Amino acid sequence: MSKNITVNISGLKKRYSPNAPLAVDGVNITCFEGEIVGLLGHNGAGKSTTLKCLLGMLPFDEGRISVCGFDIEDNPVEAKSNFGFVTDNHSVFVKMTGIEYLMFMADVYRVPTELRKQRVEFLNGIFKLGDKINNIISSYSHGMKQKICMMGSLIHSPKVWILDEPMVGLDPMTARAVLEFMKSYAAEGNTILFSSHNINSVQKLCDRAIIIKGGRQVADIDIPSLLKQNPDADLEDFYFNK
Amino acid sequence: MNKIDTKLLGVLLRKQLNETFSFKKRGKKPDVFGIVLQAFLAVAIAAVFLVFFFSFAKMYLGLSVRGVTDPYQRQYELMTVFYCVLLIALIVSAVSNINSAIFKSDDIKILSALPINSQTLFASKLATIYIKQLVYTFFAVLAVNVTPAIILQQSAWYFVFSAISVFLIPLVSIAVASLFALPYHYVRAFVHTHFIAGFIIITIVTVAAILLYAALLDALRQILVGNELKFFFSNAVMDSIAAFVAAAYPVNFIINLLFARDIVLSAIVIALLIAAAFIVAMFIIKKLFTRALQNKISANAVFKQKTKKSFKKKSVFSALVAKEFNNVLRTPSYAFSYFSVAVAMPLMVYFCMSIGLAMLKTLVFSDASFELALFLTAIFGVLTNTFCSTNISRDGEVFYSVKAMPVYGKKVLSAKVVFCFVVTAFSNLASAIVLFATSLLSLPQAFFVCLVGLLLGFAQICFATKKDFMRPCFSSEEDGVIRESSNTLSVILVIGLVVASVMGAALVYISLVTNFGSAYKSPIWSYLISGGLALVLALLSYLYLIYKLDKRYADFNGGF
């Protein structure tokens, strides 16, 4: 049975000002249900810009973006209802407590009252904020802010989970727990799309890796196929040769 | 002990002064509109102050106590009180500046890792604060010390020491302020982590400030309306002033120097005081500095007040409005400016109404209370309703996160408008109630004034919100609090003041012409002009707010 497309980016072009070079130049990404896709690229390659366009944070010049069949420009609210996101700078309402932030996100994503407590306890079990969830976010460390952002992005069990550099700032225990959670979350039929510098974690975790260089998409690698052809294949070699 | 490196001190001072006065280096366009407006307002305030102070000084210097008129003793008292007020104001500002320089400035963490000894770093921070205070002191002393000299003849020494005091007062202020820097830091940290307690403290400070302001306005009203203030200074009050002046240490040593009394003793006491305070100051600041770097107290502050856990579902709109309240209630500076609006406007309208009506009755023998109330409500509505000018900028980068949430732009901005309108509605309602309760307006008039105020307030909020949305200026501070904004504030102030002045002046003029020589009655024109204009402005501003809003929201990419 063929899997449904959850994220579809076609011919995406974005420049930050009329005379600036293209920050994203014709990127095409298609993600399917149950898939984990990693975006790889060096600093300034266009990964974050691509994700920000996908999230509706930034306007773009050309191309189409849809999430679960909803166009981000024509049906922004419907498209956004289907994903949860974590930004690279952990932008969060720092004057709220962790629990207030989660309830705010639950209100915005219209999570029913009866599910909230259960969701919070489940997510706190994974991200292990413990009682700190009642503290104001401005008192959180970098890693704790990362955790509360992830919890907020999952409060409505989105079909698509989009993360920009999710592992930065996480302690090794949590990073491992997050990787395990990502696998199980995708196994439930959800899509995960994330950007990373960490080639090894992308190789271990992802079904596909998309390499972006200078705003252009230079490779779309099916990792299981790559490893099937050559069990000793190294994504890092692939990355540096591209 | 490390010595201050004068070469490095020069480098650091140049850097700090550049940061303070250069717009280009901060990558922002100078707000020319705002600068001109600020300069204009500063000149206007200075001019009004000088007129009032001159009248007051003339009256005060001529006062007789138990039948004896001694203008030079009165001047001694006046100067003592002025230098006390100036010193207290400078100390309060210096306490805050020292804390900001040590705990909040971005550069201290970088500079402390560079090969610069701590003494040089402290000296550069203190020198920058000193230079700023020098500028304020210069203008204050120039205005206040010269005014009595116009009324009474002064010695050459008076002018020489007035000039010296410009340099001396900030020195005393910084020395004393550094003694309070540490306690202030703890109070601040407490307020930042105990929101309920913080809110109570802010409310008390706001009420105290407003009461002081009201007392000042009342005194001004008495000066303007008649000679009532003269009777306030009875023998008993003058005895209290004399007792205060005699005990006003160490200011009276400075005043002794100003009036060439006990010069040697006063000079020695002042010199010793400054030296002692500076030794203690350097010790305390060094301790503070070490603490700031080692513990990063402010960065790791933990919110102690646990909130009630509620999993109850709210509508998206309610959640957005609640988010705005959260942000403001838990940021002391925002809470102060948001809630002071509610208290300041009714007081300002009431006192200015009393003054204005008295003047109209005295000068043109006419009453135009309804029109004057509309005029003042419009003017003070514009002046106090300024919190909306940072409706988008306050969010900072989080605005982009909200953009990625499944909410239409109209809803996001409407929540901000509603949030600001709550306090505007409260202040207009309170103003109308005060005017009705003090019999300055009838009930229908008060209701109509409130309605016009609400419409104008709504217009201002819609316009300011869209303007800030079109050109936001996100905070670059570590705590995310806005300390410099785009030109939205200046633009809404200028437009608002022009509209309010034109409308108010037209209403008062029409009323005076209509009622000249007859019993007062509100002309129908007053209702039509004010109501019609307010309604049109509210509609136009609302249309401006929602015009292509969802498209512009999707295309939004500003703020940096």
Image (cartoon, coloured by chain):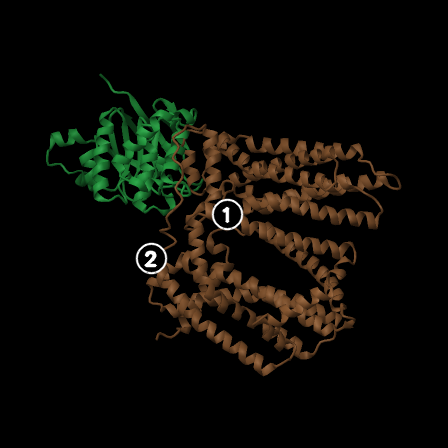
Residue at 56% across / 63% down in the picture?
Answer: B88
Q: Position of residue A23 (x, y in %)?
A: 36, 39
Residue A35, located in which quarter of the rendered image?
Answer: top left
Determine which residue is flagged by label 2.
B295
Letter of the green chain: A
The mark that comes first in sequence, 2 or 1, is: 1
Circle 2 residues within 10 Å: few <14, some 14–19, many ≥20? few
Question: Which hue is chain B drawn in?
Answer: brown
* Left or right position of A214 against B208: left
Q: Please state the chain letter of the residue tagged with numbered disc 2 in the rendered image.
A: B
Amino acid type at image mark 2? Asn
* Residue A220 appears in the rendering: no
Q: Position of residue B152 (x, y in %)?
A: 74, 73
Q: Residue lying furthest top in this view?
A: A1
Q: Which mark is residue B200?
A: 1
Residue B454, located in which quarter of the rendered image?
Answer: top right
Residue at 37% across / 34% down in the picture?
Answer: A102
Query: Foreground residue, B15 or B376?
Result: B376
Q: Please state the chain letter of the residue tagged with numbered disc 1 in the rendered image.
A: B
Amino acid type at image mark 1? Ile
Secondary structure of residue under mark 1:
helix
